[in-house]
Amino acid sequence: MKALVTGATGFLGSAILRLLVSEGYDVRVLVRENANMRNLENFDVKVIRGDLQDTDSLKTAVNSCDQLFHVAADYRLWVPDPEQMYKTNIDGTRNLIIAATDAGVEKIVYTSSVATLGINEDGTPANETTPSSLRDMIGTYKRSKFLAEQTVKELITKKSCPVTIVNPSTPVGPHDIKPTPTGKIILNTIRNRMPAYTETGLNIVHVDDVAKGHLLAMEKGEIGENYILGGDDMTLESIINYLCNSEDINPPKIKLPHNFIFPIAWIMECIARFTHNEPIATIDGVRMSKKMMYFSSKKAKRKLGYYSRPATEGLEDAVKWFNKEKYL
């Protein structure tokens, strides 16, 4: 079976790549020029240089492939140039799925995000049917992924594109080379650079379980259906306390109200516009943190046979990898 993976140099994409190789797939990857190739080291895969905006490179990449895992996305909470994110996440997704369908690719798994889904105001876990709309989307990233998912659904309906959609929650674990925003929380906590926190909640899942969920979606997922690939709902306080206890570090004692953090985030963003370094706190991040971002994976478990290990194992594996790779 020949599969194309986009985003394979990144965190989740590389986990999917490792799983596919272990399962005996013939894997090729679409990689941008100047991409960090560290997560591809020691893997015998065909590398195709290209870009989601370059339709010729996409045609080359999907040629003779049986399956496509479209994982690549521009994932940042602070976006000085929103237009570039929209082009990558929306236009690039449209370009690739049309190219794959035209090339006769049998099945496509598109990696969306729980960021596109609704959130229950009472803090109970949301699912694939929880109502959401564009006006509910906070920040450029969430808006871009929401519009990208709507674009995919339109392609399924109007062009019969063979796509199953997965919505991962918040993956943690090894090979987070960038690292992701959640990876930065883990690093800042272990480095004792988390003097305070705010009240919020996340659904934490081991990245390897999300990768397995992608393969299950490819094998069993229905065209046009969404499947949440998540793990355990955890408050930010419990995540920080778990990490501190495991590393014998004193956890932060100060819980800041959201309204107190807004001006701090605003100042950090102003500084970032001059330094071009991503701020530790962003206004959109603070706005999102006002809600408990909890989700249920019952549909994926029931329909796909999806399974997730305890989320704390993902946190442990992340810390081990960061230590091994000298991030700490």
Image (tube, rainbow, N blue to C red):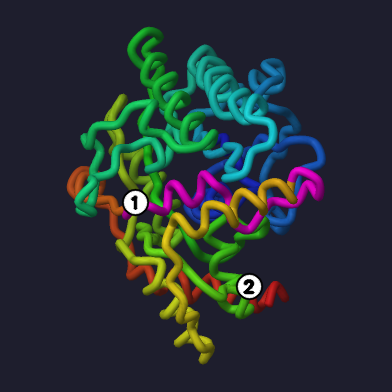
- Percent across and percent down for residue 65 are 55, 28
- Percent across and percent down for residue 196 are 51, 72
Disc 2 crowd rating (10 Å Cα; few below 14, some 14-19, many 20+) is: many
Give the image quarter of residue 208: bottom left
- Element carrying mark 2: helix
Q: Which residue is at 68% across, 50% downward?
A: 44
* Front label number (2 vs 1): 1
Q: Which residue is mark 1?
A: 291
Q: Answer whether residue 183 is visible to the viewer in this image.
A: yes
Relative to 96, residue 45 above or below: below
31 with respect to 263 (left or right) = right
Relative to 115, residue 188 above or below: below
The disc labelled 1 sits on which kind of residue? Answer: Lys
The magenta span reads 273-293
Q: Of label 2 and label 1, which has the lower sequence position?
A: 1
84 with respect to 129 (left or right) = right
- Percent across and percent down for residue 316 are 48, 76
6 with respect to 274 (left or right) = left
- Residue 286 located within the stretch drawn in magenta: yes
Relative to 47, residue 229 above or below: below
- Residue 247 located within the stretch drawn in magenta: no
Q: Which residue is at 51% across, 49% downward?
A: 285
Relative to 274, residue 148 above or below: above
Res. 144 mark: none
Q: Which residue is at 53% across, 54% downward?
A: 15
Task: Looking at the picture, tell me which residue is in the foreground, 128 or 65.
Answer: 128
Q: Which residue is mark 2?
A: 322
